[in-house]
Image (cartoon, rainbow, N blue to C red):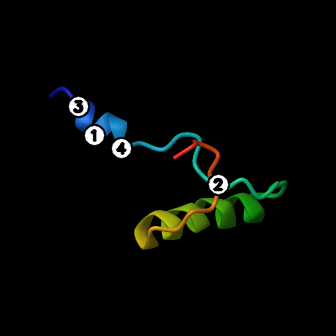
Amino acid sequence: DKISEELIERVYAPIGLDIATETPAEIAVSILSEVIKVRRGGSAPSLSGH
């Protein structure tokens, strides 16, 4: 099955908020922070530009 363009457009890459992460734990926090931002309609800058 082919993946629809609509689904592809919804993919965020790279994922995470731009908070100058360095460690794996910080990267995880950055990713989860973006998930929360999207769910709550926040406005923090993301690495993907979304």
Residue under circle 2? 45
Q: Are marks 1 and 4 in contact (CB under 8 Å)?
A: yes
Amino acid carrying mark 3 in the image: Ile
Task: Determine whether, in the image, residue 33 is placed left or right of residue 2.
Answer: right
Amino acid type, mark 4: Arg
User: Mark 4 or mark 2, which is nearer the start of the sequence?
Assistant: 4
Where in the figure is residue 42, as x and y percent of width and height?
52, 68
Tell me the mark number nearer the camera, choosing from 3 and 2.
Answer: 2
| Disc 4 target residue | 10
Between discs 2 and 1, the one toward the N terminus: 1
The residue depicted at 33 percent of the width and 35 percent of the height is 8
Between tags 3 and 4, which lies in front?
A: 4
Chain-order first, disc 3 or disc 4: 3
Residue at the spot of label 1: 7
Tag 2 and tag 4, C-beta contact below 8 Å: no
Q: CA distance from mark 1 to mark 4?
A: 5 Å
User: Marks 2 and 1: CB-CB under 8 Å?
Assistant: no
Give the spatial CA distance, label 2 vs label 1: 22 Å
Closer to the N terminus: mark 3 or mark 2?
A: 3
Q: Secondary structure at mark 1?
A: helix
